[in-house]
Image (cartoon, rainbow, N blue to C red):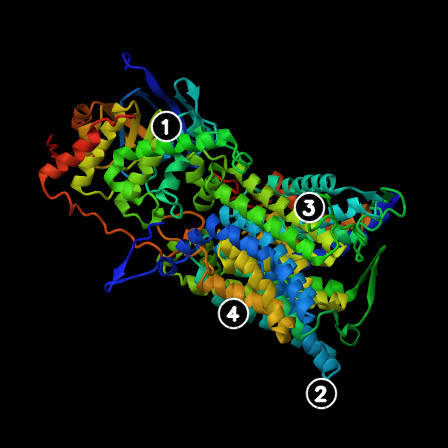
């Protein structure tokens, strides 16, 4: 970030002011530095303790409620980051995103409840959830990623629907061609009822505040917050790595990326799967949190909600995703009387964003009208002014031209 | 085997009837995709709105205080309301939500379309009904069942299918035999070149949306009269199925969409009848995946779909 | 050609689109360390040849061997890995990514650092990243004044000329054996073309072999060791610039009359 020290009308502007004026790119750069992030998460972690203080000392009754909202915010923040990976970094439209969250939930529910009489501990359950989600992600993406981007969109959309149907229909053994597969009374997913009495997460006793079975909202808040921090860390590391650059190159211009040696199929698959697995893990924690896995929680409306979070916050922006998640989660609670119109209002917001401000609040990437530069996702920031065209203005004299050419012709020495 | 032979004609007829519905909606997808290379996710919800408009008209005349009209007239009004309303809605959506993003990359309008879809569903869900709404079909259409050989099907279903086919034939004639249809096909091939030829591309796009949405509206009436219920979520499922049908036929190909629709209807019916009822919807999904794996350009498509 | 090692050997390269034969039985060789220009009127199929060699387009018949290894049929990213880098006629830098990130992408195919490796501070990943940065700094040398100050700027904010330089620099970073430049001088003024000529020679001195498509005849005459002339998908002739320049077939097809090239 070229934060120039501006002197306007002889007045020196503070660093904060400069960052504010430099636009979304600068905001993102500033907000993802450890200087900001680490304190942010630490402060966020103290929220339940603060509410507890008010509950104990002032008899505030809203404490538990707001901790639960905070937990939901943190959960959606983690989900938004996971979606941001697929959409913001790699430019993949996963319209069945929430289905993977649901797969994570149901998988955990099946291995940690009486449904199948299997009760796995945390680590093995996590492993199973990751593997199962990965399996479904590959199942969906492997055939679809060989085709154009809009095909992935529709396949994932259909997948989301199928997942819902399957969870509703698998409360009896499947009957195919008149034959019943599985013993009578086999009830995998509990149908419309869902799976109940899911075990809470059993955490190792070593953890000071949250040892034993996690039973309180605040514990789950911390777990979701931890996941958000972890995902933010992943996204940050990836962004500055070969993998992240490959993803972004694919997003920008697939052919040019391939010409640079990026195996587009493999990298797209990796991004899609990583995003799905992250969502699945969040789903697992959610199932433990609400002790249930319901089919109704995982349909297209939820996916659109997460999309709104990501686009509102700003595509490919880590603080933006968190910010967007918090806004979208908290807003319906603040505007209580309008809560029925939640989806309606958000739908309008999404459409308006796409038309008027596709880069969202803090995004540096958008899908705006393509200019001559080509590529899939287009840029849209006000950060840097385009250079003046160099129309031979500088090399006025032959001597300069010779010097310029000379400087280039001499083979550079490697140090 | 006997079971199969006995029930095959019935499943076939059922499949064709459902297929006509899929074909109607698939046409809207394929027309828009052909011209704009865009998957209009909101199309299924336009169909849903058409169904609700028709239901509204029906309820108004059957239960309402408006002067009683002969059933046939009411049905005609339902069709007009549905087709007109859906058509106008389609045009409005294009104008407001898609046109500003006309020159964006492919993925941007898809996100907007999802937003529009959610918007339509929410409006109906919150302002009209979150549950199923009954269509007073008993008062409107004779509940007569025709028996042809071993096959039984409501007469109304046959009539509606015939009307759907008529509409499709009409559309086919329009696209392939009229000058405007030629303009549409030209725009689908190369939008820029078409505008250089003096074709008003905007008008072509508007008419495309109008036609596709109107057909979907009729489909909505069809489903309402056939199944007597409508709900705010019906567009979503139909959308996926119709899209699958369009892909099977070759997305962008008008005749392909029609064939694909009927084919999918029959496939689903046979699958549901002979393999498993519960997983009927999964068949559509599997058909989609299979087509994309084995022949992504569909039956009649020529455009290469693979990445270069 | 016998005294020089053959780097690229193209034989019978053909591609058809439906009924249209875009490139028809094209054969030529490029020797190691040569600068060969591919010229011809618009629509001759030159960029198509690049697309065929780089794998962006699949050839119908024919072969293109790099140091004996067949390129035809390989996926694009494998062709790059074999040592072919290219630029595009319409300039395909990654608009959203910074200059540095664009350049680092050139290192993609020769660094080994995986998805999971970058999460933990895997030593191999760190070393790979460091090596990549070094190579980028090295490539930047050739463009010191132009791109150095703009390393952290997004590519879309660069001037047209700088975007072209960026694309070339990015191709260099990929450490190719063969560099395909598609109309590198398009839209440049005489000073910039002079710079470009020097640049291409410098790259050749570094050990690169260069095949370029170019319309600007003086530049072609100036730097090429050989010129291949195409029209309607076939090779009309090839030879040293002076020979080709005077060949009546070429003049007839393309160069026009009385073009005087001042050296």
Give the mark toward the camera: 1 or 3: 3
| Circle on res. B92 | 4
Q: Are marks 2 and 1 in contact (CB under 8 Å)?
A: no
The CA span between labels 3 and 2 is: 74 Å
Give the mark toward the camera: 2 or 4: 4
Residue with the mark numbered 1: C175
Quarter occupied by residue A76 = bottom right
Q: Are marks 1 and 3 in contact (CB under 8 Å)?
A: no
Residue with the mark numbered 2: B67
Question: Within 10 angstroms of label 4, few (less than 14), some, or many (20 or more) residues?
Answer: some
Give the mark toward the camera: 3 or 2: 3
- Depicted B201 relative to depicted A232: above or below: below
Q: Is residue C16 left or right of residue B280?
A: left
> Which chain hosts label 1?
C
Farthest-out residue, right: A184
Give the mark toward the camera: 2 or 1: 1
What secondary structure is found at the residue carrying circle 4? helix
Q: Position of residue B273 (x, y in %)?
A: 81, 50
């Amino acid at each position: 970030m070229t934060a120039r020290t501006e002197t306007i009308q002889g007045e020196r502007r503070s660093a904060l002011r400069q960052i504010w004026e430099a636009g979304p790119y600068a905001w993102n750069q500033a907000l993802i530095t450890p200087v900001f992030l680490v304190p942010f998460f630490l402060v966020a972690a103290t929220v339940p303790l603060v509410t507890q203080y008010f509950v104990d000392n002032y008899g505030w009754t809203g404490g538990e409620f707001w901790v639960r909202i905070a937990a939901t915010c943190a959960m959606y923040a983690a989900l938004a980051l996971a979606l941001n990976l697929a959409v913001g970094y790699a430019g993949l439209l996963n319209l069945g995103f929430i289905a993977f969250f649901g797969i994570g939930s149901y998988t955990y529910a099946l291995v940690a409840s009486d449904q199948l009489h299997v009760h796995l501990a945390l680590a093995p359950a996590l492993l199973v959830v990751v593997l199962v989600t990965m399996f479904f992600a590959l199942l969906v993406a492997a055939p679809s990623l060989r085709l154009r981007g809009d095909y992935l969109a529709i396949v994932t959309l259909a997948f989301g629907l199928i997942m819902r149907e399957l969870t509703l229909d698998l409360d009896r053994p499947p009957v195919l061609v008149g034959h019943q597969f599985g013993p009578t009374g086999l009830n995998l997913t509990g149908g419309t009822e869902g799976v109940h009495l899911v075990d809470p997460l059993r955490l190792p006793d070593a953890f000071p505040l949250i040892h034993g079975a996690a039973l309180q909202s605040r514990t789950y808040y911390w777990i979701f917050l931890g996941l958000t921090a972890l995902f933010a860390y992943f996204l940050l590391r990836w962004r500055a790595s070969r993998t992240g650059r490959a993803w972004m190159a694919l997003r920008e211009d697939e052919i040019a990326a391939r010409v640079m040696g990026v195996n587009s199929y493999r990298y797209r698959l990796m991004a899609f799967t990583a995003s799905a697995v992250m969502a699945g893990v969040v789903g697992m924690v959610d199932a433990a949190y609400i002790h249930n896995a319901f089919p109704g929680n995982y349909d297209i409306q939820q996916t659109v909600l997460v999309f709104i979070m990501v686009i509102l916050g700003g595509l490919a922006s880590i603080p933006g995703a968190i910010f967007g998640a918090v806004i979208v989660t908290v807003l319906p609670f603040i505007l209580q009387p309008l809560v029925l119109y939640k989806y309606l209002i958000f739908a309008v917001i999404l459409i308006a964003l796409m038309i008027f401000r596709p880069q969202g609040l803090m995004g540096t990437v958008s899908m705006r009208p393509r200019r001559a530069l080509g590529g899939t996702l287009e840029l849209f920031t006000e950060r840097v002014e385009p250079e003046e065209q160099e129309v031979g203005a500088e090399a006025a004299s032959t001597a300069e031209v010779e010097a310029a050419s000379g400087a280039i012709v001499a083979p550079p020495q490697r140090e | 085997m006997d079971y199969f032979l006995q029930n095959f004609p019935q499943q076939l007829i059922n499949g064709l009837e459902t297929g006509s519905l899929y074909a109607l909606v698939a046409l809207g997808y394929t027309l828009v995709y052909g011209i704009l290379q865009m998957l209009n996710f909101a199309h299924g919800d336009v169909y849903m709105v058409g169904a609700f408009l028709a239901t509204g008209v029906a309820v108004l005349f059957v239960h309402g205080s408006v002067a009683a009209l002969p059933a046939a007239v009411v049905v005609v009004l339902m069709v007009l309301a549905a087709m007109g309303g859906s058509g106008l809605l389609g045009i409005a959506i294009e104008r407001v939500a898609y046109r500003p993003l006309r020159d964006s990359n492919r993925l941007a309008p898809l996100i907007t379309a999802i937003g529009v879809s959610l918007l339509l569903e929410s409006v109906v869900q919150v302002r009209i009904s979150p549950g199923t709404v009954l269509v007073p079909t008993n008062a409107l259409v004779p509940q007569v069942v025709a028996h042809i050989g071993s096959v039984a099907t409501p007469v109304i279903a046959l009539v509606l299918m015939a009307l759907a086919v008529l509409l499709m034939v009409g559309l086919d004639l329009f696209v392939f035999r009229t000058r405007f249809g030629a303009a549409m096909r030209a725009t689908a091939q190369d939008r820029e070149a078409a505008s250089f030829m003096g074709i008003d591309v905007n008008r072509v796009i508007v008419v495309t949306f109008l036609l596709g949405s109107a057909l979907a509206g009729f489909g909505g009436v069809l489903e309402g009269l056939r199944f007597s219920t409508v709900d705010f979520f019906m567009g979503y499922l139909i959308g996926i199925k119709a899209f699958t049908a369009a892909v099977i036929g070759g997305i962008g190909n008008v005749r392909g969409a029609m064939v694909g629709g009927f084919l999918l209807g029959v496939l689903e019916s046979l699958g549901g009848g002979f393999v498993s009822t519960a997983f009927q919807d999964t068949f559509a999904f599997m058909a989609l995946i299979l087509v994309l794996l084995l022949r992504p350009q569909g039956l009649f498509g020529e455009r290469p779909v693979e990445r270069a | 050609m016998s005294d020089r090692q053959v780097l690229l050997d193209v034989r019978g390269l053909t591609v058809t689109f439906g009924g249209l034969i875009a490139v028809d039985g094209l054969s030529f060789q490029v020797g190691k360390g040569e600068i060969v220009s591919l010229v011809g009127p618009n629509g001759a199929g030159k960029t198509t040849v690049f697309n065929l060699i780089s794998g962006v387009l699949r050839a119908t018949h024919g072969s293109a061997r790099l140091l004996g290894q067949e390129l035809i049929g390989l996926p694009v990213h494998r062709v790059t890995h074999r040592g072919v880098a290219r630029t595009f006629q319409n300039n395909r830098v990654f608009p959203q990514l910074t200059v540095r990130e664009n350049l680092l992408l050139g290192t993609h195919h020769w660094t080994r650092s995986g998805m999971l490796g970058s999460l933990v501070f895997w030593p191999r990943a760190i070393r790979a990243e460091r090596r990549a940065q070094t190579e980028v700094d090295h490539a930047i040398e050739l463009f010191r004044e132009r791109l150095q100050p703009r390393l952290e700027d997004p590519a879309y904010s660069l001037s047209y000329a700088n975007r072209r330089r960026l694309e070339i620099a990015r191709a260099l970073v990929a450490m190719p054996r063969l560099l395909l430049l598609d109309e590198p001088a398009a839209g440049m003024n005489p000073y910039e073309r002079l710079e470009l000529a020097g640049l291409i020679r410098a790259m050749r001195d570094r050990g690169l072999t260069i095949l370029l498509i170019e319309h600007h005849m003086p530049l072609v005459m100036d730097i090429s060791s050989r010129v291949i002339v195409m029209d309607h998908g076939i090779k009309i002739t090839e030879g040293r610039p002076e020979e080709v320049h005077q060949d009546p077939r070429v003049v007839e097809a393309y160069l026009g009359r009385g073009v005087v090239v001042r050296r």
